[in-house]
Amino acid sequence: NAGVTQTPKFQVLKTGQSMTLQCAQDMNHEYMSWYRQDPGMGLRLIHYSVGAGITDQGEVPNGYNVSRSTTEDFPLRLLSAAPSQTSVYFCASSYVGVAEAFFGQGTRLTVV
Amino acid sequence: AQTVTQSQPEMSVQEAETVTLSCTYDTSESDYYLFWYKQPPSRQMILVIRQEAYKQQNATENRFSVNFQKAAKSFSLKISDSQLGDAAMYFCAYMYYGGSQGNLIFGKGTKLSVKP
């Protein structure tokens, strides 16, 4: 049982580069979300999805795009990376109506 | 907007002793969940304990218990018989029961050190 799988675990980007953080879950969860964690800030919601084809913005969506074409996958795209996007990114999933979120192991992203 | 506040950036406890981490929150909703998550150096987010707002009884999980004061909007975590493995960042989090259920609002965290 893989749970929530994030790839890559570490990434270094140059300013202006683009990349996609991958998130996949095998639990048939409807709800998926992306958070970023910065020192002294806790985790903040970037984008979320309540099902395939449905996405919405969270607290800090600027600079990030998402799409949800399947129940299993919820990739996070950085179109033009900036140093302010240096952070640890977490993907989470859960059943709608069940208050238990499953987290991936995180991706540490550094933008230089 | 809902907010979660953890007023203790760092705490320290002696092994085998008891420590209490504080959390307050603000919401106008009546149906919600509160959580404590543990994040060890491995970075993994581990659910420690969950409390449903409609339940008056405080949640307990082995050595971990909460003091939930709904009127005061307070949700503290008590760790009894502290162990070296309890050393980690602890995050308090809120989830609204309806609407965009699933969205967690986190506090800024408390770093707990355990002294042998």
Image (cartoon, coloured by chain):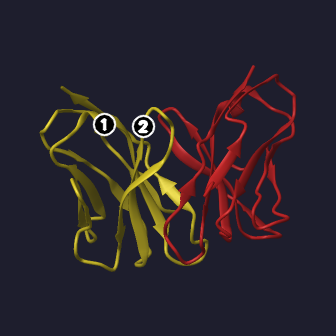
Chain colours: A red, B yellow
A106 left or right of B74 in image: right
Q: Residue furthest toward the left?
A: B17
Confirm whether residue B116 shows in the render: yes
Percent coordinates x, y for residue B24 in the rendering: 33, 56
Marking on residue B40: 2
Q: Quadrant of residue B19?
A: top left
Please name the residue that numbered disc 1 is placed on: B85
Same chain shared by disc 2 and disc 1: yes
Amino acid residing under circle 1: Gly
* SS at mark 1 in the image: helix
B57 left or right of A79 in image: left
Marking on residue A32: none
What's the chain of the residue with tag 2? B
In front of the other: B57 or A46: B57
What's the chain of the residue with tag 1? B
Number of other residues with Cα within 10 Å of mark 1, as a class: few under 14, some 14 to 19, many 20 or more = few
B62 left or right of A64 in image: left
Q: Assign the C terminus of chain B to one quadrant of the image.
A: top left
Amino acid residing under circle 2: Pro
Answer whether labels 2 and 1 touch (C-beta < 8 Å): yes
- Measuring 45% from the left and 57% from the top, which residue is drawn there? B3
Percent coordinates x, y for residue B82 in the rendering: 19, 41
Number of other residues with Cα within 10 Å of mark 2, as a class: few under 14, some 14 to 19, many 20 or more = some
Percent coordinates x, y for residue A67 in the rendering: 83, 59
- Measuring 57% from the left and 67% from the top, which residue is drawn there? B102
- In primary-sequence order, the first of circles 2 and 1 is 2
In front of the other: B59 or A61: B59
Relative to B110, is B29 above or below?
below
B82 left or right of A62 in image: left
Front label number (2 vs 1): 1
Confirm whether residue A59 shows in the render: no
Work out how far the residue at label 2 is from the one at label 1, CA to CA, in angstroms.
9 Å
